[in-house]
Amino acid sequence: MKSRGAFAGILLTLFFARAASLVLHFVLPAPSGTRVAEHPFQLLPAALAGEIGTLAALGALAAAVSWASARAGLLVLAGGGGFLLVVSQLDLELVRWTGEHLNPYWIGAYNLGAHRRLLKEVVLGDTLALAAALLLVTVPAAVVIALARRRGPEHVSWTAAAALAALSCAALASESLLAPSRLALRRARPALVGLVSESVAAIGDRPSPHEVRTGIATLHRFLNRPPRWFPEAGYPVWHPVTAEETSYAGFRVRPLDAKPDVLLVVLESARGWETDVRRPGAAARVPEFHRLWKERGVAFPVCIATGYPSIEGRGGILLGIAGHPSGILLYNARELRVLSIGEILARAGYVRELVAATSPAFEKMEDWYARWFDAVRYDPADTTDEDLARRAVERLEAPRESPLFLTLFTIATHPPLFRPPGADPKTPRERYLAALGYTDRALGRIFESLRRTPRGRNTVVIVVGDHATANPWQSIRLPRLGTPNAGENWTTLLVAGPGLPGGSVREDLTSQLDVGPTLLGLLGLDVSNHFFGRDLFEKPAPLPQGVFALRFHGLAAWEPPLLLQARLDDPSFAQAWRWESYESHPDPENGDYHHGVKQELSGEDQARIEELKTMARAWGAVLDGNRVMPPARNGPSAAGARGATRAP
């Protein structure tokens, strides 16, 4: 069959579509208000090389198939091209919204159809980028179909197939030469290359038995718990308490007024530098948060989220353990034997409820929520933090015979940021502060309700961020900052309750993982658990701890005064920061905070980073081996943790 140019025409169409898509990706602002890279056209050559390599590989495959069947070869090229257009554009949109490429762990982790409000806000709040994305998929796809129909199938010569294969190898190999750094290369690589490389990297993260033993020993020193705190070698983070039933039973027989309600507020995307009560202006930014702190709260402004995004942060708060070094803990480890703070409180006699504006189906959390809560009070009509506050007040003021553990997930500061009625913010930071202020006012309604009754005033209130969210300075530099980083993980923690010294500040390093142990300490429960954190109010004062966070092969470890960063899949990436330093010159667009001051890595720092990487891999092996807690402790306790229900 004589060549009629269908292959060449389709490949050129795909290339020009992908090139246009990449240019727009690097030029258009992301939802954060900034571009996705500090110097976008530095990444463009590497990104184009990756696209050429991917398309040439597709062409070589289709050419080889055409030797057996010209029609099948055309189908591979046209169908594969359409698939590539869709997946590649989805990948770029994911980078715009999350800073991460499509990878094996994202696939299946979310059900976007279950979050219609978010879909609506994406369409209305990012219309230009979304319209461009749709055009760059549909128009080229239509051209490809037209070319395939008009010019028909063809046999491609073996020399053309060999040339395409050679071009693919050369283009993909040149990516690393064209990218400014290996970390930047991760932001420029094509979607399919990223999926393959992430899968290969996950296999490479499996440590040897010796590395596991060494890493667990490092983890125990890192957590700095008392000797024999974790006595079981087979379950290296399990802390057994032999007399726990005595503690549970003693709590259950207390009168109701001696069993305080607990309100856990998980503050969406809470930036630690914006809620830092030590800084001027905090009272104006979050007045209700500030008022509760002054009345009966202790602020922990140096609080680190051990997970990002929300699904990881919530796992850290409620399970008290770090995430997986390469996957998404709550999605990839549904059969993991773990014990949440909710299950512990159920055994102590608490009724556990969740109030949220997001369907459990969005993050596929139905199974976890069934273990953590007795009722999930989600109603699609509740779309704002004011709606959630109203529902929370109803639950707190309802008569009951058992103490209540009420968890509230706020929503307004989740991108795209909620714009309060009448607000007209101009800059990215103004939009964030407007949404944060709206959440703060909604929480104020709840706090005011608690002030009205003796039981309310006796309620233990914990406000903790699920993670932070990068400001414009950080967002545009993510290819250099790496992940996790302070912009994603520096959040806030406030503990308020009877007898606490209101208006006090604790500047020691804390994390989400301290929430469970601190709550157990305030309630007087001494029970078995696997929490990494410690009771922040224990006497004598708790031993200092480091905090580490993991995200898709990235590692960040906070050991005062430094933040050390590394990648498990890239030996060349290592950084150190004095991360808590605010800018000496005012920068109101970024809240006077960038990422602290970068430090030169010493030999001691390099050696420590290698130890921490071994620790992270060993922790991954513990999760993969389901060795967080012994089998006898699996699942909801026999004391009556009930299945969650959707209860509007």
Image (cartoon, rainbow, N blue to C red):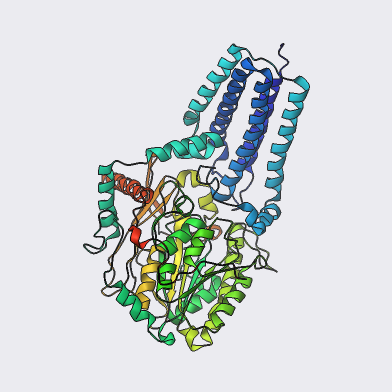
Q: Nearer the viewer, residue 618 or 423?
A: 618
Image quarter (top left, top right, bottom left or bottom right) of the N terminus:
top right
Image quarter (top left, top right, bottom left or bottom right) of the C terminus:
bottom right
* Residue 524 seen from this side: no
Q: Nearer the viewer, residue 511 or 85?
A: 85
Residue 53, compared with residue 567, is above or below; it is above
Q: Quadrant of residue 391?
A: bottom right
Q: At x 40% / y 48%, what residue is drawn?
A: 325
| Number of marks present in the image shown | 0
Residue 105 x/y as whole percent: 50, 45
Q: At x 61% / y 69%, what residue is drawn?
A: 385
Q: Is residue 633 left or right of residue 479?
A: left
Q: Nearer the viewer, residue 55 or 541?
A: 55
Residue 280 x/y as whole percent: 48, 70
Q: At x 71% / y 50%, what residue is drawn?
A: 127
Q: Is residue 456 left or right of residue 14?
A: left
